[in-house]
């Protein structure tokens, strides 16, 4: 029987600066069920696994392949403390770690540009990402889109990789050479193509598209992941090369989709023209008070056309005809005045518990945003399930497709109704958290949270009540913070749950079971 060594970081001082103490706390991935049938699961994009056939692997008798086995033997003889750290880090799971890396990038780039000397605001440019303002501004809709594309691409790539693992049926490296030690658990029983390499390649390709100023950092993470797999004793260089090739091919399909999903047209100003003015004019035309930026100088609204971005789970007709909520209380009505008075009450009467809730769910500038917060909550819970890598990917894909579609539905409603914020209507209202620069109805936090709770409650039914309570608390945090009316929050939760239910319906038919 082969030895199985668990390597841990003993002294914090020896840990890489890129791997924080929080990142090291997760156990090694050792799933209860390998999900060997995942090659039959339904992909998100209409991809045919036969179109992604890897090259034939080298024969185990070939001298070149034996050299690959020798390479692993020699590497394992020279394992350093940093190598041990790296093995422990990536051994917790490829999907988990790349999700963390994505969240860190979102937080780094979640910074709104400062105004120019003339009072105008610059727009980040993908063509020059390292010039100020840095591209991207990873606001909540952008972040939700990033989480969705990376997670969905990981899932499809792993489904196709599992299909080809069964076809090729290559034994694991330590099974082919008794000099090789299996240092990590082997979630898969077959080596070619490497599942970890599939994830590192597809994640790296998507992240380079989404964060073009971080190519060197992403390459560094990919190299660390690649080395961990070679040291693990599970896969050879050819297994890893085949996985990376497959991952890159799948990434191209998602990159093509991303370039045509209309996200590039979601900005407020094009060629100096203020395109969002039509929303304000439509609002005035029906005798309603339109939203006005409360920043000084006034900042154009954030992504006013994001509601036109192509969803993952439904079409645009469904968005407008089924998901878009009814109008909020008229700004001239008694119902509106009552809601405004309630906001003022919470503004003037904060309690310690309500302030805790406001700050816990704030997710403002410099954080990984509300969608990222739900990704972190999900990751902490998924770890307890001992899932396979492909099931991790499926769960994140379902969650993040719901979150991007929730942001599309939310921004559609915001700019369809163009409702003013409470502090605009009553300047005596002092907000207890940051005031977002876009219309009020419906609450983004509420919509994100309703969608996330719906999906997570389906995936882990024993935790459904906890997720629902968290979503309600996240929603109410915006009322307690005096930046949303109650109807923004309650309707946002309802819309989010509707969106989440589309992800649940997909999950019920993708062949993976619960």
Image (cartoon, rainbow, N blue to C red):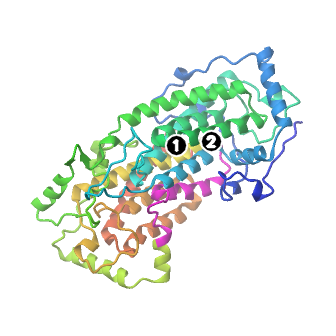
Please state the horizontal and vertical placement of residue 488, each as a whole percent of the image.
Answer: 32, 66
Whether residue 38 is in magenta: the answer is no
Circle 2 Cα neighbour tier, 10 Å, few/some/many (<14 / 14–19 / ≥20): some
Q: Which residues are magenta?
A: 359-388
Q: Residue at x 84, y 30 (%)?
A: 73
Q: Residue at x 67, y 39 (%)?
A: 225
Name the side, left or right, on which 505 lies relative to 71.
left
Name the side, left or right, on which 13 lies relative to 251.
right
Where is 493 relative to 8, above or below?
Answer: below
Name the side, left or right, on which 184 lies relative to 36.
right
The circle on residue 221 is 2
Q: Tell me the residue that label 1 is attached to.
A: 214
Task: State how far apart marks 1 and 2 are (Cα).
Answer: 11 Å
Asked whether the viewer can see residue 501, the reply is: no
The circle on residue 13 is none
Name of the residue lying farthest toward the front: 117
Q: In front here: 328 or 263?
A: 263
Circles 1 and 2: CB atoms closer than 8 Å: no
Please state the horizontal and vertical placement of residue 486, each as a whole percent of the image.
Answer: 33, 71
In which image quadrant can residue 365 be found? bottom left
Q: In front here: 415 or 335?
A: 415
Asked whether the viewer can see residue 215, the reply is: yes
In which image quadrant can residue 433 be found? bottom left
Whether residue 373 is in magenta: the answer is yes
Which mark is first along the chain, 2 or 1? 1
Please state the horizontal and vertical placement of residue 50, each as a whole percent of the image.
Answer: 54, 21
Q: Residue at x 32, y 77 (%)?
A: 343
Instruction: Name the secondary structure under disc 2.
Output: helix
């Amino acid at each position: 029987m082969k030895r199985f060594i668990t390597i841990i970081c003993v002294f914090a001082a020896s840990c890489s600066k890129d791997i924080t103490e929080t990142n090291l706390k997760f156990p090694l991935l050792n799933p209860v069920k390998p999900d060997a049938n995942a090659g039959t699961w339904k992909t998100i994009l209409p991809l045919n696994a036969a179109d992604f056939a890897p090259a034939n692997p080298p024969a185990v008798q070939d001298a070149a392949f034996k050299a690959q086995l020798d390479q692993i033997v020699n590497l394992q003889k020279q394992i350093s403390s940093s190598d041990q750290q790296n093995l422990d880090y990536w051994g917790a799971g490829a999907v988990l770690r790349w999700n963390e890396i994505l969240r860190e990038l979102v937080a780094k780039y979640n910074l709104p540009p400062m105004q120019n000397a003339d009072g105008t605001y610059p727009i980040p440019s993908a063509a020059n990402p390292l010039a100020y303002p840095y591209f991207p501004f990873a606001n909540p809709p952008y972040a939700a889109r990033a989480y969705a594309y990376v997670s969905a691409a990981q899932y499809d790539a792993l489904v196709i990789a599992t299909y080809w693992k069964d076809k090729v049926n290559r034994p694991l490296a330590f099974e082919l050479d008794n000099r090789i030690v299996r240092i990590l658990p082997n979630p898969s029983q077959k080596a070619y193509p490497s599942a970890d390499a599939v994830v590192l390649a597809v994640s790296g390709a998507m992240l380079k598209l989404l964060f073009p100023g971080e190519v060197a950092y992403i390459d560094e993470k990919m190299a660390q992941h690649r080395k961990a797999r070679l040291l693990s004793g599970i896969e050879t260089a050819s297994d890893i090369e085949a996985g990376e090739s497959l991952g890159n091919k799948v990434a191209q399909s998602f990159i093509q989709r991303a370039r045509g999903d209309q996200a590039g047209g979601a900005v407020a100003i094009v060629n100096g023209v203020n395109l969002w003015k039509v929303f304000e004019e439509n609002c005035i035309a029906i005798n309603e008070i339109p939203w006005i930026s409360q920043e000084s100088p006034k900042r154009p609204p954030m992504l006013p056309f994001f509601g036109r971005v192509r969803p993952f789970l439904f079409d645009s007709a469904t968005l407008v005809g089924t998901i878009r909520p009814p109008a909020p209380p008229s700004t001239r009505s008694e119902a509106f005045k009552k809601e405004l008075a309630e906001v003022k009450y919470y503004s003037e009467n904060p309690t310690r518990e309500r302030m805790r809730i406001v700050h816990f769910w704030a997710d403002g500038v410099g954080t990984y945003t509300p969608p990222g917060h739900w990704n972190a909550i999900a990751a902490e819970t998924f770890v307890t399930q001992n899932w396979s890598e492909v099931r991790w990917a499926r769960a994140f894909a379902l969650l993040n497709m719901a979150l991007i579609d929730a942001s599309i539905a939310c921004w559609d409603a915001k700019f369809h109704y163009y409702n003013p914020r409470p502090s605009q209507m009553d300047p005596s209202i002092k907000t207890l958290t940051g005031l977002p620069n876009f219309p009020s109805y419906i609450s983004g936090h509420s919509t994100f949270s309703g969608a996330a709770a719906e999906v997570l409650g389906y995936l882990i039914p024993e935790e459904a009540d906890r997720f629902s309570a968290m979503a309600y608390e996240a929603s109410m945090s915006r009322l307690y913070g005096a930046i949303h009316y109650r109807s923004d929050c309650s309707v946002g939760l309802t819309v989010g749950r509707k969106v989440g239910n589309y992800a649940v319906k997909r999950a019920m038919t993708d062949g993976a079971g619960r």
